[in-house]
Image: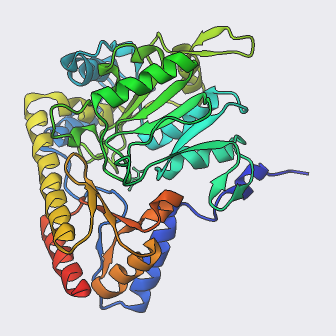
């Protein structure tokens, strides 16, 4: 008899963003005349930078001739891209990351989901609340969590983010082995200082723990004091894996290109306490289960680092950050406390009511889609997340509609 992985039965019925998409579809069917503005899922709306498009076209043309055609590429990514990433994203910030410590992939979502395969099932995992749901759900699927009661899984240590700590969680009260951190944060838009991040690195070193650091939104940082990479902190290479993505930075949500950094010095331990490097393990995993990102997409990704590409990406990021500022100002003027939107494309709004109630109100009265904070965890109750990823016109329209709906 074929049997299922029963851990899947512990998950909530559908993934947060699928749930929202279904509600929006139902609303549109019931109200076909209403035009809905989506500020829910963080999906970009502007075209790829011109430099990326040109490189993409050129690489597609190369595939048309036997002499320049490429078949399977290296599972870890082409060196032309890994070298650029190492130089511009890390060395330029004083972080000594080598090209061969970078694994190019088709998304930070997949990598943050897959990385937990490297670790034992009975480790203690610390997960922020509120949180990007992928970290928690994939640990549930893997069997690391017991039952769920009152929106809390057994065996998971929740790192609570709230107004008091500025949505930068403090250290767990019990020892943990694996820690997920995401800054600038999805969903709250909060950021972490170098000092605070340094304390997390110290914690991981003292406890022989590992930090999974999701920096997918680093390009939105405006404040020079905020770290872009955990490797800006001394000693982080031994205890941290970092995830990055071109999705939001350069409009690659549909094109798919990201990367994960697994430094060669980064270690985890076997049951006898013997240290093992994670780099060869992740390499083994990727070479077995992944065949790399397509050549044209990697060439397009490489173009992000050209002079032209960097200017165009800056323009794109500034465009969305201008939206973020407008949203944050408008919601603050309406009397809502907001976090984020200053170094992040997400605005975390204290809705002063149930998250889903506020979601429904904005959908029904304003035709605007947001994300209910409680979908990111118990600590998100009462909040909504508004995304800055849309056209300026749509954002201005959405703001006007929200203002009149709440008037
Ligand atoms: C989000 O809206 O939280 C993100 O778009 C989800 C993702 O990047 O997978």
Work out whether residue 39 or residue 383 is closer to the camera in this orientation and state it: 383
Please indicate, yes or no, whether residue 18 appears anywhere in the rendered image. Answer: yes
Numbered-mark total = 0
Q: Residue furthest right?
A: 1
Query: Horizontally, is 348 left or right of 15 in the view?
Result: left
* Above-or-below relation of 181 to 398: above
* Above-or-below relation of 383 to 228: below
- Rendering coords of residue 93 (x, y %): 21, 20
Residue at image position (70%, 15%) is 270
Work out whether residue 69 or residue 188 is closer to the camera in this orientation and state it: 188
Please indicate, yes or no, whether residue 73 appears anywhere in the rendered image. Answer: no
Residue at image position (50%, 22%) is 204
- Rendering coords of residue 293 (x, y %): 41, 33
- Rendering coords of residue 205 (x, y %): 50, 17
* Above-or-below relation of 25 to 228: below
Residue at image position (70%, 45%) is 145
Residue at image position (13%, 70%) is 393
- Rendering coords of residue 100 (x, y %): 39, 14
Classify residue 41 by image quadrant.
bottom left
Work out whether residue 81 or residue 20 is closer to the camera in this orientation and state it: 20
Query: Horizontally, is 28 left or right of 381 in the view?
Result: left
Classify residue 103 by image quadrant.
top left
Work out whether residue 361 or residue 351 is closer to the camera in this orientation and state it: 351
Give the image's coloring scheme. Answer: rainbow
Q: Quarter holding the C terminus? A: bottom left
Query: Horizontally, is 19 left or right of 163 in the view?
Result: right
């Amino acid at each position: 008899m074929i049997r299922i992985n029963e851990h899947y039965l512990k998950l909530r019925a559908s993934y947060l963003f699928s749930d929202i998409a279904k509600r929006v579809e139902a609303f549109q069917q019931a109200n076909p005349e209403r035009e809905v503005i989506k500020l829910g899922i963080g999906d970009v709306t502007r075209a790829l930078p011109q430099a990326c498009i040109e490189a993409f076209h050129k690489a597609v043309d190369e595939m048309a001739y036997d002499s320049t055609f490429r078949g399977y590429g290296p599972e870890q990514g082409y060196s032309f891209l890994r070298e650029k990433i190492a130089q511009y994203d890390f060395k330029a910030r004083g972080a000594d990351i080598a090209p061969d410590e970078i694994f190019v992939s088709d998304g930070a979502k997949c990598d943050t989901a897959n990385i937990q395969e490297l670790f034992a099932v009975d480790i203690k995992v610390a997960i922020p609340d509120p949180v990007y749901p992928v970290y928690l759900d994939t640990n549930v699927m893997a069997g690391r969590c017991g039952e769920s009661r009152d929106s809390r899984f057994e065996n998971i240590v929740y790192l609570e983010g709230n107004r008091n700590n500025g949505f930068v969680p403090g250290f767990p009260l019990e020892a943990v082995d694996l820690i997920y951190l995401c800054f600038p944060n999805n969903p709250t838009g909060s950021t972490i200082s170098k000092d605070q991040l340094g304390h997390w690195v110290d914690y991981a070193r003292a406890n022989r723990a590992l930090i999974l650091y999701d920096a997918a939104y680093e390009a939105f940082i405006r404040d020079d004091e905020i770290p872009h990479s955990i490797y800006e902190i001394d000693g982080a290479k031994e205890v941290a894996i970092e995830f990055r993505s071109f999705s939001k930075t350069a409009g690659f949500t549909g094109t798919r290109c990201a990367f994960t950094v697994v430094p060669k010095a980064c270690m985890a331990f076997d049951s006898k306490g013997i240290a093992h490097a994670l780099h060869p393990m992740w390499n083994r995993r990727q070479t077995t289960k992944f065949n790399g990102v397509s050549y044209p997409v990697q060439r397009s990704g490489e173009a992000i680092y050209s002079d032209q590409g960097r200017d165009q990406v800056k323009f794109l990021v500034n465009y969305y950050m201008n939206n973020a500022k407008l949203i944050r100002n408008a919601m603050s003027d309406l009397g809502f406390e907001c976090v984020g939107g200053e170094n992040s494309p997400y605005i975390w709004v204290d809705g002063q009511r149930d998250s889903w109630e506020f979601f429904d109100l904005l959908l029904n009265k304003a035709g605007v889609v947001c994300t209910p904070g409680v979908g990111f965890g118990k600590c998100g109750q009462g909040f909504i997340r508004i995304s800055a990823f849309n056209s300026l016109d749509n954002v201005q329209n959405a703001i006007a509609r929200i203002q009149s709906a709440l008037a």
